[in-house]
Image (spheres, helix red, strand yellow):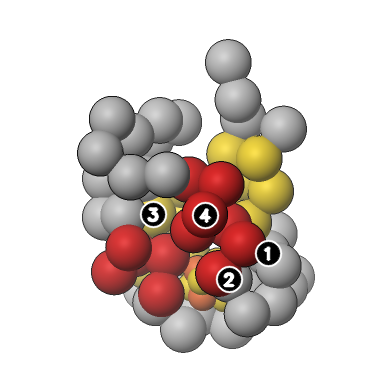
C-alpha cells in the first residue's frame, strides 16, 4: 500500500493538489496541504504528485 505524504517544509499552499483530489489533500489553517486519506479510487495520485510545483508530494 502506497504511503502519501506532503513535505510541510516544501509545500507553498498553492491548492493544486486539493483541487485535483479533495478526497486525499486538504489545505488546513496553516496554509499547507495535509493528507487526509491514503488512497483515492477516482484520481491518479502519482499524476497529482507530478503536478506539484515544488515536488512536495511523495508517494512511497
Ligand atoms: S500542489 Fe504541492 S505546493 Fe501545492 S498545495 Fe499541494 S503539496 Fe502544496
Circle on res. 52: 2
First of labels 4, 2 by sequence position: 4
Dot 2 beta carbon under 8 Å from ligand 1 = yes
- Mark 4, residue position: 47
Viewer-nearest of labels 1 and 2?
2
Image coordinates of residue 28 in percent, x first then y, are 37, 66
Instruction: Give percent across and percent down for residue 9.
Output: 74, 70
Q: Is residue 8 visible?
A: no
Q: Residues within 10 Å of mark 2 (few under 14, many from 20)?
A: some
Mark 4 nearby-residue class (10 Å; few <14, some 14–19, many ≥20): few
In space, the residues marked 1 and 2 are separated at their CA atoms by: 7 Å
- Circle 3 packing at 10 Å, graded few (<14), some (14-19), many (20+), is many
Is 16 above or below relative to 22?
Answer: below
Residue toward you, 16 or 11: 16
Q: Kindly identify which residue carries mark 1.
A: 56
Disc 1, ligand 1: is the CB inside 8 Å? yes
Mark 1 near mark 2, Cβ–Cβ under 8 Å?
yes
Q: Quadrant of residue 6?
A: bottom right
Q: Quadrant of the C terminus?
A: top right
In this rendering, which labeled residue sits more in front, label 4 or label 1?
4
Q: Earlier in the sequence, mark 4 or mark 1?
A: 4
Amino acid at each position: 500500500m502506497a504511503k502519501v505524504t506532503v513535505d510541510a517544509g516544501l509545500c507553498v499552499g498553492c491548492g493544486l493538489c486539493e483541487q485535483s483530489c479533495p478526497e486525499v489533500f486538504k489545505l488546513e489553517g496553516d496554509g499547507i496541504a495535509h493528507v487526509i486519506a491514503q488512497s483515492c479510487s477516482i484520481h491518479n495520485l502519482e499524476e497529482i504528485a507530478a503536478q506539484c510545483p515544488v515536488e512536495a508530494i511523495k508517494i512511497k
